[in-house]
Image: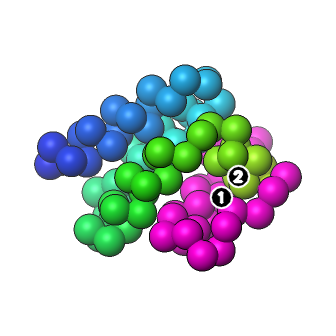
Amino acid sequence: MDNRRKKLLFRSWHRGTKEMDIILGDFAEKNLAALSDIELDAYETLLDVPDPDIFNWVIGKDQAPANEPYSSIVSKIIANKVYQK
């Protein structure tokens, strides 16, 4: 794994809330290696979004902004379903 992906993996597991650590950390472990450079850019941008916003998008309470570069990554995270039984 290259340095950029290692840093993104670390940031994914160290968000500040346990729920987002699990959701983003699991997603990153399973998917970072396969993401393109454009998708990595989008994921990196997503990691700058506050945890409560991402959490609400993932659980379906709110819709992620469709015009943001990370909207397709949010869809992939939702499809990952680590947070569901």
The residue lying at 67 percent from left, 67 percent from top is 65
Residue 73 rendering spot, x and y as whole percentages: 52, 64
Query: Is the residue 69 above or below the residue 22 in the image?
Result: below
Asked if disc 2 and disc 1 are in contact, CB closer than 8 Å, the reply is yes
Residue 25 screen position, x and y as percent: 47, 38
Specify the quadrant that holds the C terminus: top right
Residue drawn at x 72%, y 54% as measured from the top left: 57
Residue name at image x 65 percent, y 58 percent: 78
Mark 2 residue element: helix
Label 2 packing within 10 angstroms: few (<14), some (14-19), many (20+): many
Q: How many marks?
A: 2
The residue carrying mark 2 is 58
- Residue stretch in magenta: 61-85
Q: Earlier in the sequence, mark 2 or mark 1?
A: 2
Q: Is residue 4 inside the magenta stretch?
A: no
Please say whether residue 79 is visible from this viewpoint.
no
Left or right, 21 with respect to 29, comes to right
On the image, numbered disc 1 is attached to which residue?
78
Q: Residue furthest right?
A: 61
From this view, report whether residue 12 is shown above or below residue 70.
above
The percent position of residue 70, horizontal first and vertical second, equals 51, 65
Q: Main secondary structure of the magenta part?
A: loop
Residue 76 located left or right of residue 12:
right
- Residue at disc 1, secondary structure: helix
Q: Residue furthest left?
A: 2
Binning the other alpha carbons within 10 Å of mark 1 as few (below 14), some (14 to 19) or many (20 upward) gives: some
Residue type of the residue flagged with mark 2: Val
Colour approach in the figure:
rainbow
Viewer-proximal residue, 17 or 81? 17
Magenta stretch: includes residue 81: yes
